[in-house]
Image: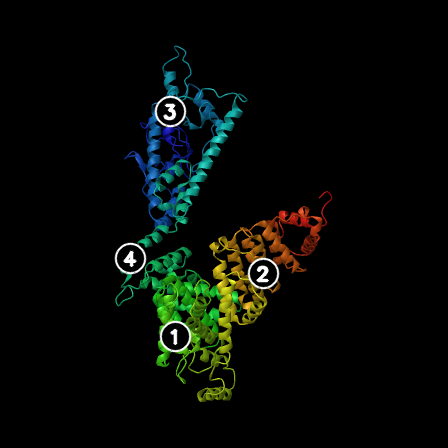
């Protein structure tokens, strides 16, 4: 409590108290009167001069009449000397703590002087009052902490009054005796000029003492709570750098906190975030010459910065902003040299792509993981990260494609070819058609001139297809390259046509229900698609993307003689070194028949038996099934189609085509399930009979083995679907499923059933089949070890749908 409030603050630990009153300065220095210390010599220095030690270990200068805070003047062994030693590490964190302690000491000394001045002008105790207090007072040992006893304070005074000055009280009593025993004087309070002054006689026990003790205890608890809050503030990271630290230190010391502890708190909590934040004003030009001849090299603080997670994060952020900084490049390489930091740097993503060495190192690590990936999901995860990193800039994309084209020639070449194609599609989606124009750069060198012409033409077709159908003239020119009019003319590599984007463009133009194609266009598209799907190109220099080289590498385990024989056969044009076109004509005819079938189906015409036979035949060709699926998806995914449709048939022909596709083309199941979701979304809740037809195809996919794919789709679809349609799907899945159930299957079905609002009491006697399915499901779930366990709501739902329900259900 501050002295300005007239309160009493116990001396700090390690502080000696001089009992000489300010009003008795006229007495001799050699004979101090009324000191609490029995040995006045203990308060003297080596030269015999008396020293006084005030709050916070500050020395009293008798000549200057002020407290002296100079370091080195503290007596040996005092708490202030310990504070001085503890203040040395605080200088490393900044001089804020030391200056604050000095200013707090000056404030405290000023408060002491004001207190002495106030005491000189106040009236003393009444006669005999001070003697009674002195009789019960114990001697205070030098350097001993004075304990605060609320029972020794008059209740009327409270906790905010100063203790009586015993010497001043004795002097006042003597003056009263010298005045004689004339008129009887009334007893005066200890501080007659203040409200709530101490009375001559304390209250007898039992008269308000308990209430006063409780108030004093609450005051102590409040003071301790305030002290704890201040300590917590001083322990905050970089508290010494806060603008209001001076005020916090003053409050802490005035709240009876130890200055030594404050210095320790500030020292231990120093982190240096301010210095780190100053790097936000990073100027790469200031470090441009550190690695040149005569430069200073990397700064010494860099090692400490990258040793901390916050420092490394700051380096990553700055590296993403200043992509040509030599210092940041050096810092990232230093980070990569630390064990286990590659994944941390890789997690930053494409922001570090500006540093080519770092980018190449991370890309090589991901490619090694891709070569060793054991399953499809791991490869997809690596592909996503690779696409993000490599598409950060043009030079990183070109470098990655060059590396992938080279890896195609080695074992697992097909895997790297897929990565190259996905990378190209991702870059085109981000940066536009210019990416397709760059495709001709990656053609294998040493090829005939016609190969490069085809590569350039395909780049133009892909670039133009980004905004719609490619020009008919370019498609006709491509058809002439692969179907030459002159016999003996070399056919370009078939691998050029097998790019996923090329096949998608050809299918989109051939299977387009919205427009009628000329016979010449149908012939051109079907011919190119037939070559891409059915031709067997084993020519040694055919696949410009390394197909032959990869095949040779995959067979590298054979003996040297076998490899030599294969190479000789290819050079002679025999064996597997030819272009086999035997399956192309049949595939071409099937494509043309499928395109015609798609036009009739999308017009809701009633299908004949001959149409269904044709559909079953053409669906045996994967390329024809893919074309029909694309045509149906384009039409059925449009909401306006369902708003203006004239569906008079209960089972339209497109449902028959989709049903025939399930057992014949397993590779298209994922695309088929996506089409069902888009069609149901576009349809809404307007036609439940048609929706149940689509859901029946989803049940077929469950029977074909796509159980968890369908369940994942159903859990997402149920949130926006009509509950009756969800119940239709649930009962269909239960019909084609049988126990025992896996925890994943049972848990997913349970969530879908709860969303569908299935209630056993709503079923009638005619629904005995559904009841049997529910009984089978609930009985099988009782044997399942769910992880995590079922919630109370899920367990209750299983009990509700079970036949073993409690009576009264």
Q: Which mark identifies residue 283?
A: 4
Give the distance between the C-alpha atoms of the residues marked 4 and 1, in whole angstroms.
54 Å
Residue 225 in the figure: left or right of residue 797: left
The numbered mark, 1 or 3, whose residue comes first in the sequence reads: 3
x and y, in percent, of residue 600 in the image: 51, 64
Instruction: Looking at the image, tell me whether mark 2 or mark 4 is earlier in sequence order.
Output: 4
Mark 4 vs 1: CB contact within 8 A: no
Gap between marks 1 and 3 measured at Cα: 116 Å
Query: Could you tell me which residue is drawn at 42 percent across and 18 percent down?
Result: 127
Q: Secondary structure at mark 4?
A: loop
Q: Nearer the viewer, mark 4 or mark 1?
A: 1
Q: Earlier in the sequence, mark 4 or mark 1?
A: 4
In the rendered image of this protein, does residue 486 appear above or below residue 733?
below
The answer to which of marks 3 and 4 sits earlier in the sequence is 3
Q: Quadrant of the C terminus?
A: top right
Residue at horizontal 52%, vertical 54%? 683
Q: Residues within 10 Å of mark 4 (few under 14, many from 20)?
A: few
Please tell me whether residue 241 is drawn above or below residue 706 in the rendered image: above
When the figure is inspected, residue 655 is found, relative to residue 413, above or below; the finding is above
The foreground one among 774 and 110 is 774
Q: Nearer the viewer, mark 3 or mark 4?
A: 4
In the picture, the quarter occupied by the N terminus is top left
Give the image location of residue 639, x and y in percent.
48, 54
Residue at label 1?
478
Query: Of residues 218 and 99, which is closer to you in this image?
Result: 218
Q: Is 644 left, or right, of 61 in this rendering?
A: right
Q: Quadrant of residue 352?
A: bottom left
């Amino acid at each position: 409590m501050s002295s300005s409030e007239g309160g009493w603050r116990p001396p700090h630990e390690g502080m000696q108290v001089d009992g000489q009153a300010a009003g008795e300065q006229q007495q001799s220095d050699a004979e101090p009167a009324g000191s609490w210390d029995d040995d006045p010599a203990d308060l003297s220095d080596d030269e015999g001069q008396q020293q006084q030690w005030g709050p916070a270990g500050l020395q009293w200068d008798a000549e200057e009449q002020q407290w002296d805070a100079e370091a080195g003047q503290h007596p040996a062994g005092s708490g202030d000397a310990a504070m001085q030693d503890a203040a040395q590490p605080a200088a490393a964190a900044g001089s804020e703590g030391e200056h604050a302690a000095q200013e707090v000491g000056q404030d405290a000394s000023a408060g002491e002087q004001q207190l002495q001045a106030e005491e000189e002008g106040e009236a003393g105790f009444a006669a005999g009052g001070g003697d009674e207090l002195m009789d019960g007072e114990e001697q205070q040992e030098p350097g001993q902490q004075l304990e605060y006893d609320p029972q020794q304070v008059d209740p009327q005074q409270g906790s905010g009054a100063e203790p009586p000055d015993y010497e001043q009280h004795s002097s006042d009593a003597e003056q009263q005796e010298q005045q004689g025993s004339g008129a009887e004087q009334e007893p005066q309070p200890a501080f007659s000029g203040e409200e709530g002054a101490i009375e001559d006689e304390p209250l007898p026990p039992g008269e308000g003492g308990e209430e006063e003790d409780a108030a004093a205890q609450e005051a102590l608890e409040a003071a301790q709570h305030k002290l704890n809050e201040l300590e917590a503030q001083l322990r905050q990271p970089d508290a010494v750098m806060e603008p209001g630290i001076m005020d916090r230190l003053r409050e802490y010391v005035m709240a009876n906190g130890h200055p030594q502890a404050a210095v320790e708190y500030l020292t231990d909590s120093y982190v240096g975030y301010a210095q780190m934040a100053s790097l936000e004003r990073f100027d790469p030009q200031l470090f441009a010459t550190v690695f040149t001849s005569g430069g200073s090299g990397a700064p010494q603080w860099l090692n400490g910065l990258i040793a901390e997670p916050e420092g490394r994060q700051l380096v990553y952020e700055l590296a993403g902003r200043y992509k040509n900084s030599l210092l940041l490049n050096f810092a990232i390489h230093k980070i990569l040299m630390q064990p286990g930091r590659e994944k941390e740097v890789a997690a930053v993503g494409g922001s570090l792509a500006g540093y080519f060495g770092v980018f190449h190192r991370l890309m090589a690590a991901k490619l090694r993981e891709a070569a060793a990936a054991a399953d499809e999901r791991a490869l997809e995860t690596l592909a996503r990260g690779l696409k993000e990193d490599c598409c950060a800039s043009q030079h990183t994309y070109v470098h990655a494609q060059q590396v992938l084209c080279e890896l195609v020639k080695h074992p697992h070449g097909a895997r790297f070819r897929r990565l190259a194609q996905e990378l190209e599609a991702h870059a085109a989606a981000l940066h536009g058609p210019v990416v397709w124009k760059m495709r001709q750069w990656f053609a294998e060198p040493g090829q005939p001139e016609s190969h490069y012409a085809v590569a350039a033409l395909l780049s133009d077709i892909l670039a133009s297809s980004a905004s719609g159908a490619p020009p008919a003239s370019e498609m006709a020119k491509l058809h002439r390259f692969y179907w030459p009019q002159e016999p003996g003319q070399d056919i370009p590599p078939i691998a050029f046509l097998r790019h996923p984007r090329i096949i998608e463009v050809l299918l989109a133009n051939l299977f387009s229900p919205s427009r009628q194609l000329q016979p010449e266009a149908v012939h051109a598209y079907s011919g190119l698609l037939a070559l891409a799907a059915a031709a067997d190109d084993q020519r040694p220099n055919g696949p410009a993307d390394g197909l032959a080289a990869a095949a040779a590498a995959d067979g590298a385990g054979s003996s040297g003689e076998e490899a030599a024989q294969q190479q000789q056969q290819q050079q002679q044009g025999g064996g597997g070194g030819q272009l086999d076109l035997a399956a192309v004509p049949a595939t071409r005819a099937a494509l043309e028949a499928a395109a015609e079938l798609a036009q009739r189906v999308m017009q809701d015409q009633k299908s004949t038996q001959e149409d269904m036979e044709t559909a079953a035949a053409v669906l045996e060709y994967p390329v024809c099934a893919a074309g029909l699926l694309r045509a149906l998806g384009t039409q059925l995914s449009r909401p306006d189609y369902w708003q203006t449709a004239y569906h008079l048939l209960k089972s339209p022909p497109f449902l028959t085509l989709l049903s025939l596709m399930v057992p014949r083309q397993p590779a298209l199941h994922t695309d088929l399930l996506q089409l069902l979701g888009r069609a149901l979304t576009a349809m809404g809740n307007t036609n439940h009979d048609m929706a149940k037809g689509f859901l029946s195809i989803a049940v077929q996919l469950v029977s074909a083995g796509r159980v968890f794919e369908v369940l994942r789709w159903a859990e997402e679809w149920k949130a926006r679907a009509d509950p009756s349609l969800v119940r239709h799907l649930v009962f269909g899945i239960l019909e084609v499923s049988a126990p025992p159930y896996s925890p994943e299957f049972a848990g997913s079905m349970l969530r879908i059933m709860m969303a569908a609002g299935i209630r056993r009491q709503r079923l009638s006697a005619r629904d005995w089949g559904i009841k049997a399915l529910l009984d089978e499901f609930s009985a099988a779930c009782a044997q399942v070890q769910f992880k995590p366990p079922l919630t109370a709501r899920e367990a209750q739902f299983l009990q509700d749908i079970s036949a073993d329900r409690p009576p009264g259900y």
